[in-house]
Image (cartoon, grey):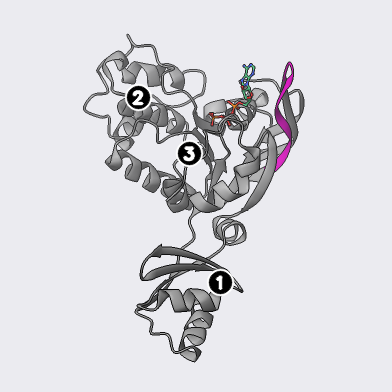
Amino acid sequence: MIEVHGLSKRYGEVLAVDELTFAVRPGEVTGFLGPNGAGKSTTLRMILGLDAASSGTATVGGRPYAAQPAPLKAVGALLDPGAVLPSRTAYHHLLALTAGNGIPRGRVDEVLAEVGLEKVGRRRAGTYSLGMRQRLGIAAALLGDPPVLVFDEPLNGLDPEGIVWIRSLMRRMAAEGRAVLMSSHLMSEMELTADHLLVIGRGKLIADTTMKDFIEAHSEREVLVRTPQAEALRGMLATVVEVRTESSDTLVVTGLEAAEIGALAWAGGVELHELAPRQASLEKAFMDLTRDVVEYQAEKETVR
Ligand SMILES: Nc1ncnc2c1ncn2[C@@H]1O[C@H](COP(=O)(O)OP(=O)(O)OP(=O)(O)O)[C@@H](O)[C@H]1O
């Protein structure tokens, strides 16, 4: 379990992390979300003892990272997949990590196999593609068989097969009872992978909830309606709820259940060809929630 209490980090004028308090529980994948510059990497670096907190505490399994007798057995992390000596083989990179952490040498081949690098483990890391370096970083995280895993943008550079692989790896790690914390900007993937969400904006915690509750709470449900009498139906509904015209025979209604729209259409003699509630997405919920805390925003474009 990761426990963060009143954690803050100031860089000169910038308060990068502002009084964060949260827990990352075992048996779940917790997604860590926030717009660019929100403070995610800084928070992860403090949990992993790579940055000192300005105030507050972060512990893994009840101890600060610096007090872990064998850190790799307590928490495995992927932060910067570039952090490997290019002249070293993956095998020797991992072997060097086992020393000092009391990890048996045989574990190196096990984790290379686990991440699919067994055939190239004796090649120099400098010859690896970005996706292979990402897998090597994950191998290093798994080396000590830790109960807590922290991944910062683990999907960067991975091809579709690699992305699916990460998803199943994270799910498996959580099913084995580990606490998994993962940041990613890929909302569709996060939606498929995480059980719980922590959302930060400008260093502050703005949501700490289950995936399901987050989507329900932060995005309005829409119903798609197809009818040859779109104008007539629009006239009936637009006075009470929000109605968007998608095409000459398609409306998108916010604020009414499908059954209510069906009943109104029936009462008004409007023929319906389709009445479909639309699944709200994590992406929509995230954008709605964080609109006001986005640090770097492009000029508005019409989102279709
Ligand atoms: N070493 C540093 N010195 C000064 N400011 C820093 C430093 N590291 C981070 N910051 C600032 O702290 C804030 C949070 O940065 P951080 O990298 O933690 O955000 P992030 O949520 O990980 O962003 P991204 O999604 O873009 O990776 C930003 O304003 C950033 O400019």
Q: Secondary structure at mark 2?
A: helix
User: What x and y, as percent, mark residue 44?
Assistant: 59, 30
Tell me: residue 44, above or below residue 234. Answer: above
Question: Furthest-left residue in view?
Answer: 119
Which-is-in-front pick, marks 1 and 2? Answer: 1
The earlier-in-sequence mark between 1 and 2 is 2
Q: Does residue 1 appear in the picture of this structure? A: no
Q: Does residue 302 appear in the picture of this structure? A: yes
The earlier-in-sequence mark between 2 and 3 is 2
Q: Amino acid at mark 1?
A: Ala
Spatial CA span between label 1 and label 2:
54 Å
Tell me: residue 249, above or below residue 141. Answer: below
Spatial CA span between label 3 and label 1:
35 Å
Q: Which residue is mark 1?
A: 238
Q: Which residue is mark 3?
A: 185
- Pointer 3 residue Cβ closer than 8 Å to ligand 1: yes
Q: Which residues are magenta?
A: 11-22
Q: Which residue is mark 2?
A: 133
- Contact between marks 3 and 1 (CB within 8 A): the answer is no
Which-is-in-front pick, marks 2 and 3? Answer: 3
- Pointer 2 residue Cβ closer than 8 Å to ligand 1: no
Q: Secondary structure at mark 3?
A: loop
- Choose between 164 and 234: the one closer to the eye: 234
Which-is-in-front pick, marks 3 and 1? Answer: 1
Spatial CA span between label 2 and label 3:
19 Å
Q: Amino acid at mark 3?
A: His
Q: Residue at x 38, y 11 (%)?
A: 85
